[in-house]
Image (spheres, rainbow, N blue to C red):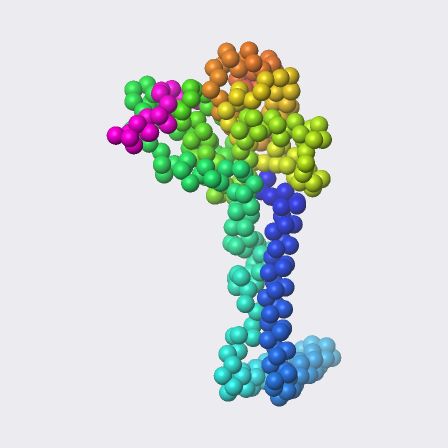
Amino acid sequence: MGLTKSQYERISSEYSARRSRALSARDKKLADIRIKYPEYSALEDESTTAAVGFARKFLDNPGMSLETMDEELHSLSERRTAFLRARDIDPADLEPHYTCPDCQDTGFIGNVKCHCFRQAEIELMYDRSNIRPLLAVNNFDNLREDLYEGDDLNHFKEAVMWCHRFIDSFDSEYGNLMLTGTVGTGKSFLSCCIAGELLRSGHSVLYFSAADFFRSYGDLMYGRSKNTEEDSSLYDSDVFACDLLIIDDLGTELQGDFSASGLFNCLSARHNAARSTIINTNLSLSDLHERYSDRVFSRLTGYYRILKLTGSDLRMKTRNIGDN
């Protein structure tokens, strides 16, 4: 998916503003030079007159040699440069100072997005993901197998393997994950690891706790959103069209008819569009079946790879290790 239309326009507007600022600053410096040194202004006029004259000659005779024109224009440029240097003015200071010299703040090099524009896209997607604060700690660099042992370790290693496969095949193979297990077994950690890798590669990710997801989704569906119309449509687009949606702690939201219907509608829409979803839950499969509708349970068991994590609460374990 990448960016929505309004997100793309927001970045493009910022690039247009950057370029305008750079050009305006350059124009002001040139205006000051022209006022202080009328001779420099005369040299500019001479260059402009020469360029226009050569252009007219070329229109009358397209086969004419351009060598003479190049030599004269180069000579005039050298005279302007010498004039400035004789007055301790660096000609480079009269050029626009772009934030990105590579694309001159257009965002593109030819028809290809500049590296700076791609980075701006990624930064915006990080901000929209709701997950940026979590990624500093929850990433593969901080993965610790030493906190598990026995079957718990085997389950964790298998889950990590499938997480890497999910990332590696994300662009070529549609898939969903559901991480189950008791509190503190690493479900949220692994989903954040996946999110961080995909965000870095330019994919759009949206992360919600279950409570926030159903509250925001309900506000949107029933017109209770306090956002502007643009923000609401943007949020709507993100939920259904972001490359990856993560719903954390499914089952902790307030229970009601809307939970089942809202979840079913969202999962169905994303499945039909082949947009991946990750769900983390402390509930067992039987608990999921009892809490949500048969339709939701069918989606979760039919379209999601279920990764079960086991063991004691890692938060308590790492806290105890720190205390010792």
Is 111 in the magenta? no
In front of the other: 222 or 274: 222
Q: Is residue 312 magenta?
A: yes
Residue at the image point whose x is 61% and y is 68% from the top: 23
- Asked if residue 146 lies left or right of residue 70, the reply is left
Find residue 306 and report its horizontal and vertical position in percent. 47, 21
The answer to whether residue 200 is left or right of residue 61 is left
Q: Residue at x 62, y 48 (%)?
A: 8
Residue 271 point in image, percent of width and height: 60, 26
Between 294 and 59, the one nearer to me in the picture: 294
Residue placed most toward the observer, 314 or 142:
314
Instruction: Kindly give the residue lying farthest to the right in the view shown.
Output: 60
Q: Which residues are magenta?
A: 302-324
Pick the quarter of the image with the N terminus.
top right
Q: Could one spot residue 204 in this view of the protein? A: yes
In the rendered image, the vertical position of residue 286 relative to residue 133, given as above or below: above
Q: Quadrant of residue 165?
A: top left
Q: Is residue 175 visible?
A: no
Picture coordinates of residue 153, whole percent (x, y): 32, 23
Res. 184 image quadrant: top left
Q: Residue at x 38, y 19 (%)?
A: 310
Measured as percent of width and height from the top left, residue 190 is found at 43, 30
